[in-house]
Image: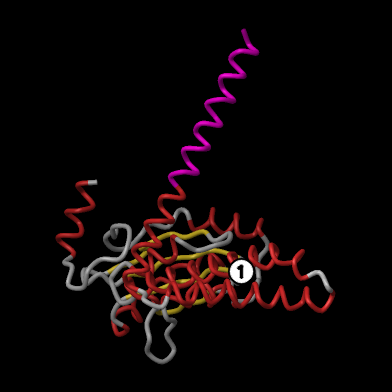
Amino acid sequence: MAGKQDKQAKKEAKKAKRAASKAKRGQIFEAFKMQRKEDKALIPWMLGAVLVVTAAVFGIGLLFGIEWALLPVGITLGLLAAVIIFGRRVQKTVYSKADGQPGAAAWALDNLRGRWRVTQTVAATTQLDAVHRVLGGPGVVLVAEGAPHRVKGLLAQEKKRISRLVGETPIYDLVIGHEEGQVPLRKLQRHLMKLPRNLKPAQVDALEAKLAALGNRGAAMPKGPMPQGAKMRNVQRTIRRR
């Protein structure tokens, strides 16, 4: 009886895995169709990558007299290069659409790769300016989005509030934008990765426990970028409905 149940469980697991794989392929195909409509250079770039990489590997094979043996390898590497180009161009399009919208920084932080601890909207104004807190190897990173003259005060207040708890732990702050001294949204991940690694994982855990007691100042914001001109009253109404 137990063996029959195990066999059934394995069968269901395989079925679920196939369904998940099919759904993922469908999502990728939909993303490709949307990107192709907006990015006329996508297909030429992808085809070019396949041809150039395949030709390069084939050429290496010619030097050693094994060109036909390396041809499948060249095609595989060319397809891989095309997929990488597709992913990067999709990412560029997504970030360009989100750039400048309220909540864009919070959305970007939600999509960080790596071991980062993100607490969104630790401080905010009714004009949808916000400060988000990120914990990681560098220490504490405060990421602000909104009007520079307003977020400057928010950052200063939040930095002062946190410094009382974290002691000598480094605190970094940055503002998302395109003005001098600001960090563009699409370069946020790269900027965080370039910061020095000052803490070990255990120290980050201890830091997170310390800061967990701090409440957030300001209204919560919904997930994802919001259209320009969004009003806080409408935003709060949306949050209450969720």
The residue that appears at 35% across and 81% down in the rendered structure is: 152
Closest to the observer: 45 or 69?
A: 69
Look at mark 1 in the image and give the residue it sits on: 78
**Magenta stretch bounds:** 1-23
**Residue 193 part of the magenta-drawn span:** no
Residue 132 lies in what quarter of the image?
bottom left
For mark 1, give the secondary structure. helix
Question: Image quadrant for the N terminus?
Answer: top right
Report x, y in % for residue 219: 26, 60
Q: What kind of colouring is applied to the model shown?
A: secondary structure
Residue 175 lies in what quarter of the image?
bottom left
Report x, y in % for residue 225: 30, 66
The residue that appears at 54% across and 73% down in the rendered structure is: 192
Tell me: residue 119, above or below residue 163.
Answer: above
Residue 63 lies in what quarter of the image?
bottom right
**Residue 17 part of the magenta-drawn span:** yes
Q: Amino acid at mark 1?
A: Gly
Report x, y in % for residue 155: 39, 76
